[in-house]
Image: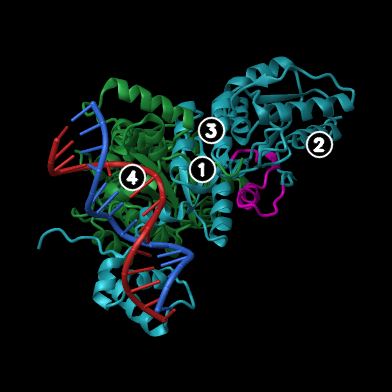
Chain colours: A cyan, B green, C red, D blue
Amino acid sequence: MGIVMKPTIKDIAAESGVSIATVSRVLANKTGSYSEKTAAKILKIAKELGYRKNSAAVDLVKKRSNVIALIINATPTNFSTQIIDGIQQRAGELGQGVIILYAGDRDNTLQHQAIITALERSVSGILLAAIEPDAEDLTLLKASRIPFCFVSLYLGTADILAVSSDNRDLAYQATQYLIDRGHSRISLVGIDNYHTGSQRQAGYRDAMAANRLATPAILPGDYSFAAGERLLQQVQAQHVTAVIAASDMVAAGLLTAAHQRGVRVPEDLSIMSIDGTIICQITTPALTSMTQDFYRIGSQSVNKVMGQPAEDFVPVEITERASVARVH
Amino acid sequence: MGIVMKPTIKDIAAESGVSIATVSRVLANKTGSYSEKTAAKILKIAKELGYRKNSAAVDLVKKRSNVIALIINATPTNFSTQIIDGIQQRAGELGQGVIILYAGDRDNTLQHQAIITALERSVSGILLAAIEPDAEDLTLLKASRIPFCFVSLYLGTADILAVSSDNRDLAYQATQYLIDRGHSRISLVGIDNYHTGSQRQAGYRDAMAANRLATPAILPGDYSFAAGERLLQQVQAQHVTAVIAASDMVAAGLLTAAHQRGVRVPEDLSIMSIDGTIICQITTPALTSMTQDFYRIGSQSVNKVMGQPAEDFVPVEITERASVARVH
DNA sequence: CTGAAAGCGCTTACAG
DNA sequence: CTGAAAGCGCTTACAG
C-alpha cells in the first residue's frame, strides 16, 4: 500500500525502456522527432499509469505558461458572463487556457493581489475586465513585460491596449435617440466619474449641447440597482421626461422605485438603459437599451493581448423595447 | 539596453552578497532563520530590482500550489457571484488563492478540460460549482488524490464532499408554504432530472402527498428565463393556482409571459421562486422566494475541501415578497 | 529517431 | 544565522 506517487515522465521512461527525452517529445507532440512505434508504446503506458503533466515543471522551463489571466471584479452589474464566454472561446482557438482571478468589489488590495498573482504565474497575457487601475497597478503592469489589455474600459491613451464600446458615442447616441423622440429634458443617472463614466457624461453633454438643450445635473451613482432605486426621487425633482440609466441595474432600480411611487414608465418617464443584458427582458416594461456586444469585446480583447489584429471599439446597437415613449 | 531579464533570487543574492538560500528564507518569511539586518537588506534590494517570485518554480519544489481551483459553468441562472464571494473570502483567510476555471455551458469537454487543468496545476483543492459530473470526471477526480468538493450540488453519497442547500427540504418547504396559503393545485416548473432537480422533485411530491394532494405533471426545463417564458402556456393548461419555479430565472420568464398573456400575478397565479437572487427584486411584482445562502455555501465548501469542519447543508430561508396570494 | 546532459528558479535538509 | 548542494519534473540544444 503506502501513498501512490504521481507518475512522472521518468516512470514512463523506465516502464517503456526509452529516455525521458523521448517521452517528453512524444507527450509534447513534437511530430517528426519520434517514431510511430515508440509513440504508441509511450502513450499507452502513460495512459495506464494515469500520467498527468506537471504544469509547474513545464512553465518553469518554458518561462511562460499558455494561459491568459482574466482579472474581473464583482461589478454590481452583470455582463461578465458574456465577456467571459467571448474570451474563453477565442482563447481556446489560440491554444490558450484562461484562469479567472477575482478582484472583489472594486477592492484595490485584491485587485493588486490579482495582478501580482498573474505576474508570478508568467501568464501569456493579462486581461482586466471593467477594472479601474490605480497608478501602482499600471506601473506594475508596464514593468512586467507581459502584454495586458483592458476589457470594456478605455483609458483614453492609445499606448495602452483596450477593447470596449465607444462610451462617448454610446451616450451621444442614447441622448440623440431620446431627443429624436421629442424629449428635451433628459438626465443621466447612476454614473461615476471614472473613465467609462466620464466618457459617457461627455457624450451626453455633447449631444445635449448639439441640440441646444440645457443639461440637468448628472446624478452620480455606482451602476447598481440600489443606486437606481435611491435616485428616482432626485429624477422626479428634476422634472425630466426621460433618463439615461448608467447600466441595466440602475434602470431596473429606477423602474422598481417608479412602480412604488406611482410613476408610470414610459408614460410619465422614459428610460433608456445602457448594457442590454437579459435584465432588460425581465423588467416590466422591458427596457429599451444601448446594447453592448460583450461577447465580441471579450473575443477581441484576446486577439489584442495576443498580438493579433483587433478592434479598439466594438459597435453598439439600439434595442427598442418598451420603456421609451414619444413625447410632443 | 537589450531585454531586461526578470530578476531571480540569484540576482538578489549576488547584489546583497549572501547565498540564494538566505534570500529564499527571507523572501519566504521563514522567521527565526535569518537576522533582521540581512532581511532588511535583501528586502530592499528585492524591491529595487522589482523582484517577483516565480510560482512555477515554487510549486515545482513544493509539489503543491496554494490555490484552490473553482470550476464553474455558465448556468443560465445567476447566483455565482455570491458563491465566488464566499469562496474568495474564506480561501483568503486560509492563505489560499483561487483560480476560476470556466466550464462553458454544461459542456462536457470543457468541463473535463477544466478538471485536467486543475490537476496539472497541483492545486490544493478543487471546487465544482453547480457541475453535474459524468462518470469519467468522477474517476479522474477520485484518482487524483487532490481533495474536491461539489458546491451547490449534492450527489447523494456521503463519501463525496459537497455543500449545498437541502434541495429536497427546500422544495418541501416551498410546497407547504403554498399549501398553507390555501393552494391545492400547485405545479413545479422548469426543472431537470439531474441531482438537484430530482431532489427538488422529490420534496415537492412528498409535500403534496403528505397533504393528500394530486401532483400535476412536472414541467421540465433547464432553469432558464427562456424555459419559464415558454412554459407558461403549459402551466395555464394545468389550471393550477400556484407554481414553484425551479430558479429565479424561470420565475422571471414565467412572469414576463404572464404579463404578455394577461395572467395576473399573484391574483390569477402565484409564483414561488427558488434562489432569491437580486432578480426577485427586479421583477414586478417582486418574487417571493426560497432564498439560498450562496455566500455561505461558498465559504463552507472551502472549509470542507481544506479539511476543516463544515456544514453539509446550509439553511434556506423563505423571503416573502409579492408574488404569492392567499387563496380560499 | 534517440539519449545524455544542462538548466529553468526555487526550497530545504544538512552541516557548520 | 548562513551556505553548499541536491532535487522538484520537465524541455531542448547538441551529438550521434
Q: Which label is found at residue B58?
A: 4
- Depth check: give the residue in front, A33 or B230: A33
Residue labelled with disc 3: A140
Residue B299, percent across and down?
31, 37
Residue under label 2 = A177
Which disc is residue B5 wearing? 1
Same chain under badges 3 and 1? The reply is: no
Circle 1/circle 4 CB separation < 8 Å:
no
Q: Residue at x 42, y 37 (%)?
A: B11
Q: Can residue B328 be seen here?
A: no
Magenta residues span A283-311
Instruction: Say few, some or many: other residues with alpha carbon within 10 Å of mark 1 (under 14 / 14 to 19 / 20 or more).
Output: few
Which amino acid type corresponds to the residue marked 1 in the rendered image? Answer: Met
Position of B159 relative to B50 (above/below): below
First reached walking from the N terminus: tag 2 or tag 3: 3
Residue at 20 percent across and 39 percent down: it is B308
Disc 1 is placed on an element classified as loop
The secondary structure type at the circle numbered 3 is helix
Q: Secondary structure at mark 4?
A: helix
Does the CB distance between marks 2 and 3 fall below 8 Å? Answer: no
Q: Residues within 10 Å of mark 3 (few under 14, many from 20)?
A: some
Q: Nearer the viewer, mark 3 or mark 1?
A: 1
Q: As shown in the figure, which amino acid type bears the numbered disc 4?
A: Val
